[in-house]
Amino acid sequence: MTLAERFDLWALQYEQRGIEKGIEKGEALLLQRLLARRFGQLPPDLIQRISQATAAEIELWGDRVLDAGSLDEVFSG
């Protein structure tokens, strides 16, 4: 593989990672909006926890939003 080909591959991987990070950030913001709409203003520590969460955690919490009766139910377990 030539240096140019390696650079192109690196650039493509870098771009893909940027897209993935953007999607994760969008999912985190959507989760925050849903939680705030359902439970009211979110505490700053919870907003920070969401912003630092993995994609799997955000997905799990997002699934719980509709059925949970409290913020604790969303984030427990």
Image (tube, rainbow, N blue to C red):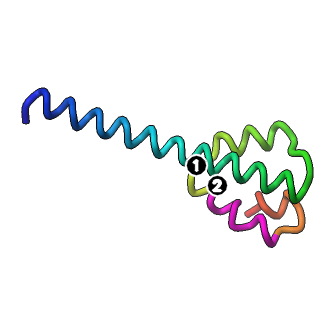
Pick the quarter of the image with the N terminus.
top left
Q: Count numbered badges in the picture.
A: 2
Q: Could you say which disc has been placed on residue 68 in the image?
A: none
Q: Which structural element holds mark 2?
A: helix
Residue stretch rendered in magenta on the structure? 58-67
In the image, taking residue 18 as reference, residue 60 lies left or right, namely right
Q: Residue furthest top?
A: 3
Mark 2 and mark 1 in contact (Cβ < 8 Å)? yes
Count residues near mark 2 (Cα–Cα under 10 Å), then give few for <14, some for 14-19, many for 20+: many
Q: Quick check: is 46 in the magenta stretch?
A: no
Q: Residue furthest right?
A: 40
Look at 66% across and 48% down and name the residue there: 28
Q: Nearer the viewer, residue 40 or 49?
A: 40
| Quadrant of the frame with the C terminus | bottom right
Q: Kindly identify which residue carries mark 2.
A: 58
Give the prevailing secondary structure in the magenta stretch: helix
| Displayed quadrant of residue 64 | bottom right
- The amino acid pointed to by label 2 is Ile
Secondary structure type for disc 1: loop
Residue that sits furthest to the left in the current view:
1
Q: Position of residue 62 (x, y in %)?
A: 69, 61
Query: Which numbered dot is residue 54?
Result: 1
Q: Residue at x 22, y 38 (%)?
A: 9
- Reply yes or no: does residue 60 show up in magenta: yes
Three-letter residue code for mark 1: Thr
Q: Could you say where residue 15 lies in the image, as x and y percent from the top left?
A: 37, 37
Question: On the rendered structure, is 72 left or right of 64?
Answer: right
